Amino acid sequence: MITHEPEFLPPPINARGRLGRIVLLNCRNAGRALLILWEAVLSLRFVLSKRSRPVVLQQLYVTGIKSLGVISVVAMFTGMILALQMGLELRKYGQEVNIGLAVMVSMLREMGPFMTGLILAASVGSAMAAELGTMTVSEEIAALEVMSISPVRFLVMPKLAAMMIMTPILTFYACMLGVVGGAIVGSTQLGVSVPAYIDNATRWAENKDLYVGLLKSFVFGIIITTICCYQGFATTEGAVGVGRATRRSVVVSFLSILVVGYIITRLFYQ
Amino acid sequence: MIRFEHVIKYFGERKVLDAVNFKVERGETFVIVGFSGAGKSVTLKHMIRLLTPDIGKIYVGDELMSAAAGADLVRLREKFGMLFQGAALLEWMSVFDNVALPLREKTNMSNAAIERRVEEKLHQVNLEGVHDAMPSELSGGMRKRVGLARAIVMNPEIILYDEPTSGLDPVTSRAIDQLIDRMRLELKVTSVVVTHDLFSALAIGTRIAMIYEGRILEISRPTDFIRSQNEIVKRFLDAQYITKRGAWERTDHETQ
Ligand SMILES: Nc1ncnc2c1ncn2[C@@H]1O[C@H](COP(=O)(O)OP(=O)(O)OP(=O)(O)O)[C@@H](O)[C@H]1O
Ligand SMILES: [Mg+2]
């Protein structure tokens, strides 16, 4: 069941008790979040059913198109900043043509997935938490459960599908825009011609960089959806609770993205 | 049909239900009245297992609702329709889609059949011409009635109403009362109605239960209920100008 009864725990007796409780509650919450993810993954088989299709399309639109503007600006400037900073350093050694490689690799490996992940967590993810949180406190989720309509299949699955598809696409788009931004800075400020930049960027970057970056962003999409939907369903105490759930969903998503990002990097680049 | 056996529920230190025992018979309209915060909504939520008792058992038919899980719970819940106190409509769906939701999700009915059924239910709750309105555009009373239409759209055996007439004008309230009564008479539906409105309680109830601070004070037929000797029940009746004669009276007018 997604709806949980209100909880009243007696205050912990001492500091050790408080610590223990924090650990236990967090483990339980992580378990609940994973159960939601599991059910959502299982219900992905309905993603193309006639009833879900319009909802999934709408979610794809919300996730993809609505965050396109922010992602474009952020990606472009990230690429420009990277090119400028590294170009100025490399120029000391007469190596400024290598900014192509530097921008390409750092965008693909790290900056692209991270930027996209953080932006999606802050915009799409927080909206998920707020929406589900509001539905929880106004008993709409309880009403769905009473009608035996799974809130996970009905509400989470379309969001998960949209994020699984859209995060890698947006990441790829962000990487490419970043590279374009680098090219602009290279040609206007560092005297690196665009063909030389492109040649340098494509010659040395590996396919592996692209694949690992996209894998990372795919995982980020799943993490964001799971955390934000869980926080939404776990909302209590009215409007204040919705605010708290939204804030928590963004903070926890950010931290998880950082930690998981490191782990994936560590796995693939020893 | 629904049986509470010594149900105790704590919210933290507070005992919100204190050894509640009662039985709702098949085909009856069981009305629960009581002051605000007495535990009426909590009682109703126990019936459909949105809450689980800390101590005690709840049966639906012969099955133990308070311990049902998985497919059993789904099957048991399918017997129920429920109107929530705040209507609990999905805000991003139109009125029509809200009412049609259970039909679309749980049945294989054709679109035309769904449309006919939704139309019929909206008509029964005195709502017409608001098909495409969004819930946020409706008044509180209209939302209630959409929620009511959604609760009855699957033609359930048992319907739980949390304050079906609160916030409605008297004429619409009586129409809802008649709807509840008609469902009992024609479709043999079992209803549990939580209400503040003693007029409708007396009009539609086959039995009335008064709940006070988590305890059942009195369960009796309407005719006995207004003659109750219990002080708190009397106070509750007096507050709504209901006397033993069953009609309201205003002392200032009578003495003039
Ligand atoms: N989620 C909750 N968390 C904490 N306390 C709760 C919760 N829900 C209900 N209560 C408490 O339980 C008691 C009974 O609440 P309930 O909602 O059943 O009242 P009610 O009889 O339906 O009142 P009303 O007529 O105002 O709807 C109240 O005192 C309330 O404070
Ligand atoms: Mg209530």
Image: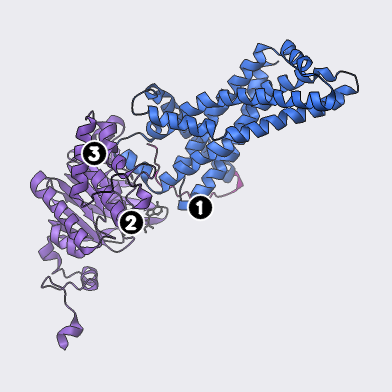
* Label 2 to label 1: alpha-carbon separation: 24 Å
Question: What label sits on residue B64 in the rendered view?
Answer: 3
Which contiguous range is marked in magenta?
Answer: A1-16
| Location of residue A231 in the rendering, given as x and y in whole percent from the top left corner | 50, 40
**Chain shaded purple:** B
Up the image or down, B146 lies above or below A260; here it is below
| Location of residue A236 in the rendering, given as x and y in whole percent from the top left corner | 45, 48
The amino acid type found where label 1 is placed reads Val
Q: Do callouts 3 and 2 mark residues in contact (Cβ within 8 Å)?
A: no
Magenta stretch encompasses residue A11: yes
Q: Viewed as shown, does residue A139 lie left or right of B108?
A: right
Decide which of B72, A171 is in the foreground and name it. Answer: A171
| Location of residue B251 in the rendering, given as x and y in whole percent from the top left corner | 19, 82
Question: What label sits on residue A240 in the rendered view?
Answer: 1
Q: Is residue A258 visible?
A: no
Among the two numbered marks 3 and 2 on one chain, the one whose residue lies closer to the N terminus = 3
The amino acid type found where label 3 is placed reads Leu
Magenta stretch encompasses residue B242: no
Disc 2: which residue: B139
